[in-house]
Amino acid sequence: MKKIDLHTHTVKTISDYEFDFELSKVKEYVEKLRIDALAITNHNVFDLNQYYQIKNSLTIPVFPGIEIDLEGGHLLLITDIDDFEISNFDEKCKKVSAIIKTNTDTLTLEQLKSIFPELSKYILIPHYDKSPEIKQATITALQPHITSGEVASVSKFKRMMKEQNVLTPVLFSDMRFRSDLKSFPTRQTFVDLKDISLAGIKSCLADKSKISLTKESGNDFFEATDDGLELSTGLNIILGGRSSGKTVTLDKIASSSGNTKYIKQFSLLQNDEETFNKTNDTRLSIIHNNYLSEFKLAIEDVIQIDLQQNHLNIEKYIDSLKKFALESEKKDLYSKCNLFSEESFSINDLKNLDNLIESVITLIENNEYQEIIRKYISQDNLKNLLLELIQKAILSKVENEEKKWLNTIIGDVQRELRIKTTSTFVENVDFYNIAIDEMKIEKFKGVVGELKKQRKINKEELGKFSIITSTKLIESASDLQKIGRDKKTYSTPFSKYNNPYEYLLKLKEIGVEDASLYKFFIKIESKTLNKDGFKVSGGERSEFNLIHEIKDATKYDILLIDEPESSFDNLFLKKEINTLIKDISQLMPVVVVTHNSTVGASIKPNYVAVTQKNIENQDFVYRVFTGYPSDKELTCSDGNKIKNYDTILNCLEAGIDAYTERKTQTYEILKD
């Protein structure tokens, strides 16, 4: 098995954050992590001179590559190390660089195929379950040249390995060789090869059985630190005496693992109320935005309506109509022209038609649910529907353009006639839109009335806790000040609270931004209750925070917890936390540092690691011994071994004697 990393960066481009390249870090990375092959894949750029500098400084194969912005996603394109191919590749990459000049530019499929006409010569690896992803339609269009896809984490790699009809997953570092690097990522992939070659790697990428997360342990393990520590992709427990390196090991895992959820020792106790309130505010903000999202759209529409101006326009129209009628027998040559009092053509609103076209395109291009869609509507029918809708849109847009052109002529002629005549002209008024505005205001009042009805809008269960979110009426101007989080005077708007449209205008008058107006119509409050239905106590806040933090880990790639028993009692840990941790470990790697038997033994981990500190030749030597919980011995990477049974008892029970004493002299005596 050979360890490869085909996604690295050595040049700062418009798509990168600031970093200074350091060649010595490339050498250190290759040596420390025992990399067998590397690819240099900078964003839309290939630096030929730098490539040869890196290649000549290493003893392993270094493949030339480029990471291309393609159709909104990223694609790795890697070529062979033959000098002629490298020169040819350099010329092609210059064409990519000429097109991609900003961080929003992207190549089209046609441009890619034009620049690289012989795609079969290269390795093509799209971002697959990693942002920014290449769309499935683009991947399909590039078949048969794509067989593997890059993923962002160990958990995603494992999931894709188990799924059928998906690309072979690969995991790469995507690292920048910065001068300030202190540790290295452990995201690499092993391929089943004896000798490294581009053709050999391509062959392995087409076969899941020839890809692995580790050299010898398969895909149930992963490299957790850059010094070679392997852990389970499930639940791991780290044990050890005081100052033996447990937290140091956890810190190393965190620095090598990327997107990590790290719950540090005592962190939830130190600021338990602050953490609790912050969590509550974040949840409230999300619920607030979700619950009021449609109301926000209504506000955006209604705020554009000016009823006062509409009424003034009607009055002007009536006055001009009366005057026009009185002067009808005194018309001069100019006012007798037909165009003098001609109305403008109304322009058709094509928004619904455009939305309909977008929806049909979505149905045609959707890959995830294509099987269900085709059960009811054939692709041919969808394409015919799309064609007819587009034709209708073209005709309607042409008609609108013609009307606009005619309206311009009518307006110009009327202006000239009105300059030359002494007759009164009738003001133009769009009664239809005015009527629509009136109906919108009435409908808006009804919507606000419904919105103000107090109700529970969300209930969330989190372990033994319940979070209930409800809506309430705004009761005072101070409530509005809390919503606005400012020092504006809200007494005038509040006096109009029962007249939704007037209230909206008053809020706008005092300077509330349009984007925030929707927040001021109701209060949304949240209460966190314990299992008995009472508001949580101070101690329960810490328990809630821990449960919330562990649940939050599903947004990350790995969960690390340092000694949860330092802050919580054993009953809570066993009943609430152990089950939660076990569930999370089905989705991602979990590593828990502990010296507590409730967590260490009762949780039944997949893998155990024990840290030790010894003095050898007057120096401290730190070791990590690993193995299955059922193993007789645990092994260190240097070949040293320790007895599993003795070690577990020492770490969790203070040794066999203390364990026996507690059992016989304390627990047995208390039994009935």
Image: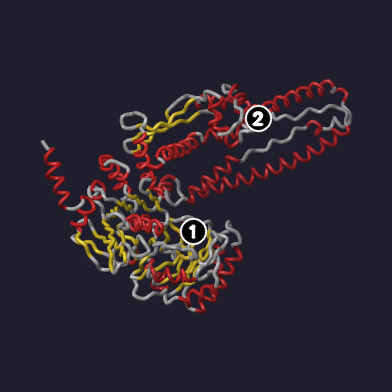
In percent of width and height, residue 18 lies at 55, 60
623 or 332: nearer the viewer: 623
Identity of the amino acid at label 1? Thr
Lateral position of residue 429 relative to residue 92, left or right:
right
Find disc 2 in the rendering and name its residue: 509
Q: In the image, what residue occupies the spot 50% across and 57% down?
A: 73
Local SS, label 2: helix
118 or 504: nearer the viewer: 504
Residue 165 appearing in the image: no
In percent of width and height, residue 155 lies at 36, 55
Q: Is residue 659 above or below residue 191?
A: above
Q: Are marks 2 and 1 in contact (CB under 8 Å)?
A: no
Lateral position of residue 308 relative to residue 190, left or right:
right
The label shown at residue 138 is 1
Q: Earlier in the sequence, mark 2 or mark 1?
A: 1
In percent of width and height, residue 33 lies at 38, 68
